[in-house]
Image (spheres, rainbow, N blue to C red):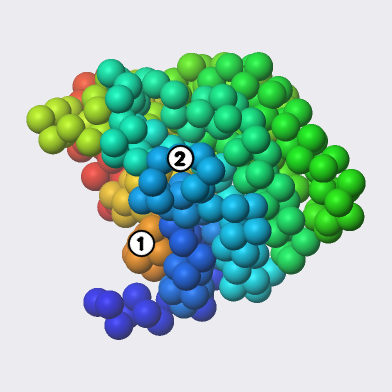
C-alpha cells in the first residue's frame, strides 16, 4: 500500500473531473521542509513559528532574536524552492505554552494567547514581523495571523505589519512589499463574521482544531472529554461550509490547515463544501491525494448539500461514509 502511494509523489492532485487541488504541508521547523517536498508538498500552508520559541525559558529577552528567526524563516523559504511558505505568527499559550511555569491563566485557551499575546508585546511582535518580511526577499512568503476575532485586532495587526515594513525600509533591508496577509479562522465568532475578514484579508485558513474546541466548548487537550470532540457536529460543519463558500464568493482563497484537512475520511466532505486547498502533516499528503484522484466533484457536492441540511449525528456519519463510495 505504501509503495503504491509512493508512486503518487509526482502525480498532480486533480479530481476525476479535472479540478486542481492544492496540497500543502504543516511544518514546525525549517528542517521539516525537505521531507515535505519529498512527499509532494506544493508549499507550506502552515509554519507553526511558535516551535522556534518553545522550551526557551519564559523571559521575552531570551526569545530568539530577529536575526535568528530570520535565518529559520529564510531556511524554510529557500528549502521550498519557489513554492509558497505560509508563516504563522506566534501562536503561544493554551496547548503551546512558552514556558510551562508561566502557565498561570485560569483558562489558558481563553486567555492571552496567540495574537492577543502578540498585540500585548508589540516589540516582540514587530521583531517577528520584520524577520518574516525579510525572509520574503528569498521566495514567496505569506503571513498568517492566529486567533483573530475582533476587527480592531485585524486592523492593529495590519498596522503593525506596515510599521515593520517602514522600519525595514529605514534600515535598507530587502523584503517583498506585497506579502499576502491572512487570518486563521478558528474562533466561532470569526467564522460568523466572515465579511469583516474578507474585506481586510488576502486569504483565510481554517484552524479546525481550535474551531472545534471553541464551538463545542471541549478542551482539545483534555482526555476526559475527548469523546465529545466531534468534527462532524453539525455546528462545526455549518461554520466550516459557510466559511468556504463566503470566501469563494468574495474571491478570497480559503484553506483548511487543522487536522481535518489531513484526515482521509474528511477529504470528500471538504471537497464537497468547495475546499480546494488543504494543508496537513506531510505524511498525510499522499493518502489525501489518493482520495482526490478518485473523487468526482459533481456527485460529491450534491451529497454534501444533503449532509449540511442534516442535524442527526448518526445520519451525518453514515452520509459521510457514503461519500467515499461515490
Ligand atoms: C488549528 O487550530 O486547527 C490549527 C491549525 O492550529 P494549531 O493546531 O496550531 O492551534
Ligand atoms: Mg489553532
Q: Nearer the viewer, mark 2 or mark 1?
A: 2
Q: Residue at x 60, y 38 (%)?
A: 124
Identify the residue under disc 1: 284
Query: Could one spot residue 39 in this view of the protein?
Result: yes
Q: Secondary structure at mark 2?
A: loop
Q: Nearer the viewer, residue 210 or 167?
A: 167
Residue at horizontal 56%, vertical 25%?
Answer: 120
Q: Residue 72 placed where, x, y %?
A: 57, 63
| Rendered residue at 37%/20% (across/down) | 110
The percent position of residue 273, horizontal first and vertical second, equals 47, 37
Q: Which residue is mark 2?
A: 59
Question: Where 256 sits versus 132, above or below?
Answer: above
Q: Is residue 261 left or right of residue 315?
A: right
- Location of residue 209 with respect to 159 vertically, above or below: below
Q: Badge 1: how crowded within 10 Å, few (<14), some, or many (20+)? A: some
Judged from the image, the secondary structure of the residue bearing numbered disc 1 is helix
The quarter holding residue 315 reads top left
Query: Marks 2 and 1, how far apart in space?
Result: 36 Å
Q: Residue at x 40, y 64 (%)?
A: 282
- Looking at the rendered structure, the number of numbered marks drawn on it comes to 2
Q: Residue furthest toward the left?
A: 224
Sequence-first disc among 2 and 1: 2
Amino acid at each position: 500500500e505504501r509503495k503504491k502511494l509512493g508512486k503518487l509523489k509526482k502525480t498532480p492532485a486533480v479530481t476525476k473531473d479535472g479540478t486542481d487541488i492544492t496540497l500543502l504541508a504543516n511544518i514546525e521547523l525549517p528542517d521539516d521542509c525537505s521531507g515535505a517536498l519529498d512527499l509532494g508538498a506544493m508549499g507550506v500552508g502552515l509554519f507553526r513559528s511558535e516551535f522556534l520559541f518553545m522550551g526557551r525559558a519564559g523571559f521575552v529577552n531570551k526569545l530568539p532574536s530577529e536575526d535568528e528567526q530570520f535565518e529559520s524563516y529564510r531556511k524554510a523559504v529557500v528549502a521550498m524552492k519557489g513554492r509558497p511558505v505560509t508563516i504563522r505568527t506566534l501562536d503561544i499559550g493554551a496547548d503551546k505554552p512558552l514556558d510551562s511555569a508561566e502557565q498561570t491563566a485560569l483558562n489558558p485557551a481563553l486567555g492571552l494567547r496567540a495574537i492577543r499575546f502578540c498585540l500585548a508585546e508589540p516589540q516582540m511582535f514587530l521583531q517577528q514581523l520584520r524577520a518574516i518580511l525579510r525572509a520574503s526577499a528569498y521566495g514567496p512568503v505569506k503571513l498568517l495571523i492566529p486567533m483573530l476575532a475582533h476587527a480592531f485586532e485585524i486592523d492593529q495587526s495590519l498596522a503593525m505589519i506596515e510599521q515593520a515594513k517602514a522600519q525595514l525600509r529605514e534600515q535598507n533591508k530587502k523584503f517583498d512589499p506585497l506579502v499576502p496577509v491572512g487570518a486563521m479562522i478558528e474562533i466561532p465568532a470569526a467564522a460568523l463574521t466572515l465579511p469583516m475578514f474578507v474585506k481586510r484579508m488576502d486569504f483565510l485558513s481554517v484552524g479546525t482544531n481550535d474551531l472545534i474546541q471553541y464551538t463545542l466548548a471541549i478542551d482539545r487537550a483534555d482526555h476526559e472529554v475527548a469523546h465529545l470532540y466531534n468534527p462532524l457536529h453539525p455546528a462545526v460543519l455549518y461554520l466550516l461550509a459557510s466559511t468556504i463558500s463566503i470566501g469563494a464568493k468574495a474571491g478570497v482563497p480559503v484553506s483548511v490547515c487543522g487536522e481535518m484537512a489531513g484526515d482521509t475520511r474528511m477529504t470528500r466532505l471538504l471537497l464537497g463544501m468547495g475546499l480546494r486547498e488543504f494543508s496537513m502533516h506531510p505524511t498525510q499528503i499522499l493518502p489525501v491525494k489518493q482520495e482526490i484522484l478518485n473523487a468526482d466533484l459533481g456527485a460529491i457536492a450534491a451529497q454534501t448539500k444533503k449532509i449540511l441540511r442534516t442535524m442527526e449525528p448518526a445520519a451525518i456519519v453514515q452520509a459521510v461514509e457514503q461519500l467515499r463510495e461515490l
